[in-house]
Image (tube, rainbow, N blue to C red):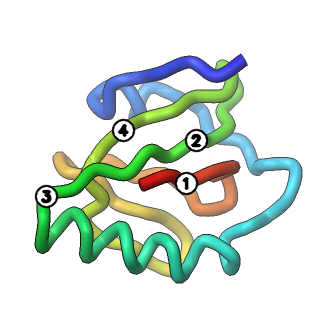
Amino acid sequence: MTTKIEKENVPQLNFLPADKDNSKKWKQDLDYAVRLGNEHKGKTTVTFVSKEGIFQVETTIWSVTENELSLKGGIHIPLKSITDIHF
């Protein structure tokens, strides 16, 4: 079961790797999500795995590095923990 969470609560979680590492698969989608957020203020829904469960956050993605995505307020989610992305 997936639980919706506010982005401000994300830093309190302990991230785990997803069953399958899709970080390379997400690269193109995440690049689009950055453009969507920065140019159009559009939000992306990111589903990820943590020790506390599976969570979903709807937010603006500010940037993506090789290992993580950055949200407004200096919040980071490891790419290896992401299980799904929706626009």
| Alpha carbon separation for disc pair 2 and 3 | 19 Å
Q: Which residue is mark 4?
A: 58
Indicate the quadrant containing the N terminus: top left, top right, bottom left or bottom right.
top right
Within-10-Å neighbours for mark 1: few <14, some 14–19, many 20+: some
Which callout, 4 or 3, points at the residue further toward the start of the chain?
Answer: 3
Which callout, 2 or 3, points at the residue further toward the start of the chain?
Answer: 3
Task: Give left or right: position of 44 versus 82.
Answer: left
Q: Identify which amino acid the numbered label 1 is placed on.
A: Ile
Element at label 2: strand
Q: Identify which amino acid the numbered label 3 is placed on.
A: Lys
Q: Which mark is residue 59?
A: none
The answer to which image quadrant residue 25 occupies is bottom right
Q: Which residue is mark 3?
A: 41
Q: Which residue is mark 1?
A: 85
| Alpha carbon separation for disc pair 3 and 1 | 17 Å
Q: Identify which amino acid the numbered label 4 is placed on.
A: Glu
Q: Of 47 and 49, which appears nearest the observer?
A: 47
Which callout, 3 or 1, points at the residue further toward the start of the chain?
Answer: 3
Q: Identify which amino acid the numbered label 2 is placed on.
A: Thr
Which callout, 1 or 4, points at the residue further toward the start of the chain?
Answer: 4
Q: Position of residue 54 (x, y in %)?
A: 66, 28
* Residue occupying the point 79% across, 64% down: 21
